[in-house]
Image: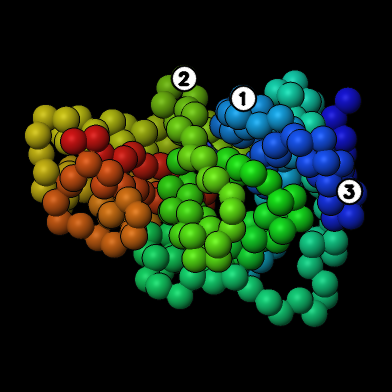
Amino acid sequence: MMIIATKISEVREQVRAWKAEGLTVGLVPTMGYLHEGHASLVDRAVAECDRVVASDFVNPTQFAPGEDLESYPRDFEHDCALLEQHGCDMVFYPEVSEMYEQDAATYVEILSDMPKQLCGKTRPTHFRGVCTVVAKLFNIVTPDKAFFGQKDAQQLAIIRRMVRDMSYGIEIVGCPIIREEDGLAKSSRNTYLNAEERQAALVLSKAVRLGQELVKSGERDAQKVVGEMVSLIEGEPLTRIDYVSAVDGITMENVTEITDGTLVAMAVYVGKTRLIDNFIAEV
Ligand code: AMP
C-alpha cells in the first residue's frame, strides 16, 4: 500500500527508515492532476531507485496574482490511483500551511539572467517560487535522485543550476516529453481547453515538428527556424504567441546558430490557456 503523508515529519521518518536499510530514494515533484507524463517520471524513478516519493502540491509561490492558482485542476483520489499503479511508495500531499509558515520570508533564487529568459519574461517571480519549493522538497525528502520532465525545459535547466550552485548531492534526471496520440504535449492545463481550442492547440506540436524537420534538413539559422515556426502558429487564429525562441540549452541565452543541444522553446496562448512545448536540436 502506498503511504499518504501530509506532514513533513512523516516523510522524514519514513525516509530515515528506508535509508537505514540502505535503500536509495527517488523524488518526483508534481502539482497533481496527474497524467501519463507524470507517470513516466514515476516509472523512471521506480526503475532507478529502491523507493519512490512523489509530491502532490500546487505551490502558491510559483503563481503570480491573476494566474490560475485557484482554478488549477485537482483530483487527489485519481492521483493516488495513478501513483500506486506505477509503483510509487509514498505520496507527500501537504497543506499550504505545512509547507509555508505564514511569515515565511526565505527564497531560493538564481540571480543570473537564466530565470528571466523565456517564461521568465512574462512570469518574473515564477522560477523563484519553483526553486524555493523544490529546495524545500529536497530538504524534506533528501532523495538520491530527482526526476523532472523535459516538457518544462527551462525549469529543468534551472533546477540543475540550483543543484550545482547549492551543492545538493542529488542527481537530476531529465525525462522526455510525453504526448497525446495527435502530438499535443500532455499537461494538466490541457483540461482548460474547449473542443475548438483543443484542436487549435495542435499547432504547438506541429511547430515543434516543423522546427525539427528544418534542423534535420540542415537549417542552422535560428531566426529562420523560429520565423517559420512563428508563421505556422500565427496561421492558427485561436492562438497568441508569448514567445518562440532558440536558446543555449544550459544557460537559456539566445543563440543565432542552431547547434547540438540548442533548446527551441515556445509558450503560446490558445484562447486563455497558456501552453508550452519545445525540442532540443540534435545536430
Ligand atoms: P507539473 O505537475 O505540471 O508541475 O509537472 C510535474 C513534473 O512532470 C515536471 O517535472 C514536468 O516537467 C513533468 N511533466 C509534465 N508534463 C509532462 C509531459 N507531458 N511529459 C513529461 N514530463 C512532464
Judge the density around disc 2: few (<14), some (14-19), many (≥20) Cα neighbours within 10 Å.
few
Query: Which residue is located at x 68 percent, y 77 percent?
Result: 106
Q: Measure how far apart labels 3 and 1 are at the Cα level.
A: 23 Å
N-terminal of the pair, mark 2 or mark 3, is 3
Quick check: 165 left or right of 170?
left
| Residue 265 position within the rendered picture, expressed as x and y whole percent measured from the top left | 34, 48
Q: Are marks 2 and 3 in contact (CB under 8 Å)?
A: no
Q: Is residue 169 above or below residue 198?
A: below
Quick check: 139 left or right of 111?
right
Which is closer to the viewer, label 1 or label 2? 1
Give the residue pinned by disc 3: 13
Q: Amino acid at mark 2?
A: Glu
Q: Are marks 3 and 1 in contact (CB under 8 Å)?
A: no
Quadrant of the image where one finds ligand 1: top right
Q: Amino acid at mark 1?
A: Ala
Which is closer to the viewer, label 2 or label 3? 3
Give the residue pinned by disc 1: 47
Label 2: element kind: loop
Q: Amino acid at mark 3?
A: Glu
Q: Quadrant of residue 66?
A: bottom right
Query: Which residue is located at x 18 percent, y 45 percent?
Result: 259
| Residue 53 position within the rendered picture, expressed as x and y whole percent measured from the top left | 74, 39
| Residue 42 position within the rendered picture, expressed as x and y whole percent measured from the top left | 64, 31
Judge the density around disc 1: few (<14), some (14-19), many (≥20) Cα neighbours within 10 Å.
few
| Residue 268 position within the rendered picture, expressed as x and y whole percent measured from the top left | 40, 49
Give the residue pinned by disc 2: 181
Query: Which residue is located at x 31 percent, y 40 percent?
Result: 280
Q: Measure how far apart labels 1 and 2 are at the Cα level.
A: 25 Å
Q: Is residue 220 above or below residue 243?
A: above
Colour logic: rainbow
